[in-house]
Image: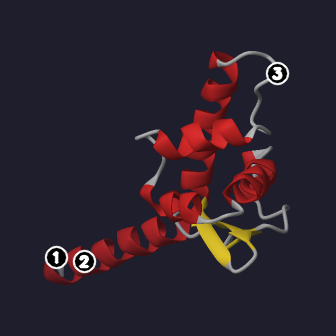
Amino acid sequence: MAALFAPMLLMLLMLTHSCWSTVHVQDGNSAFPLESVKKMKEILGKEAKAGPASVRSQSPVTFLRLCLNPELPKDLRPVCDREDAPAVFRRLELAVEDPDLCELCVNAACTGCS
């Protein structure tokens, strides 16, 4: 019985983990993990506080600094190579303006919720 219980428990844990990590924020044909987008927003918040009041997350310079930031999640780094990177980052930032709504999939940009 114990030999049967261990694999079932492992499968349940894997399923639970995969359900929690499936929320993505969609931008066009690209989708990014919600946790990565939330981390990006956190970094942008720090950048905005560090710079002058006129340099907010709307500035292309802020996005250049974001791309140079080693804390930027790896799955968002390909966006930095795109010509429309500032626009993509702005849309992602707006999509997670209230991350609770994204986790509930109230926001149309968020997919993969249960």
What residue do we see at 61% from left, 57% from top? 34
**Could you say where residue 50 lies in the image, as x and y percent from the top left?**
62, 17
Q: Secondary structure at mark 1?
A: helix
**In this view, the mark in front (3 or 1):** 3
Q: Secondary structure at mark 2?
A: helix
Find disc 2 in the rendering and name its residue: 5
Q: 45 or 96, which is in the foreground? A: 45
Query: The disc labelled 2 sits on which kind of residue?
Result: Phe
Query: The disc labelled 3 sits on which kind of residue?
Result: Ser
Find disc 3 in the rendering and name its residue: 54
**Could you say where residue 60 lies in the image, as x and y percent from the top left?**
72, 42
Q: CA distance from mark 3 to mark 1?
A: 63 Å
Left or right: 24 in relation to 6 = right
Q: Residues within 10 Å of mark 3 (few under 14, many from 20)?
A: few
What residue do we see at 21% from left, 84% from top? 4
What residue do we see at 61% from left, 35% from top? 42
Find disc 1 in the rendering and name its residue: 2
Q: Earlier in the sequence, mark 3 or mark 2?
A: 2
Q: CA distance from mark 3 to mark 2?
A: 59 Å
Query: The disc labelled 1 sits on which kind of residue?
Result: Ala
Q: CA distance from mark 1 to mark 2?
A: 5 Å
**In this view, the mark in front (3 or 2):** 3
Q: 38 or 7, which is in the foreground? A: 38
Q: Secondary structure at mark 3?
A: loop
The image quarter containing residue 84 is bottom right
Assign the N terminus to one quadrant of the image.
bottom left
The image quarter containing residue 10 is bottom left
The reply to whether dot 1 and dot 2 touch (C-beta < 8 Å) is yes
**Could you say where residue 15 lies in the image, as x and y percent from the top left?**
44, 75
The image quarter containing residue 17 is bottom left
The reply to whether dot 3 and dot 1 touch (C-beta < 8 Å) is no
The residue most toward the left is 3
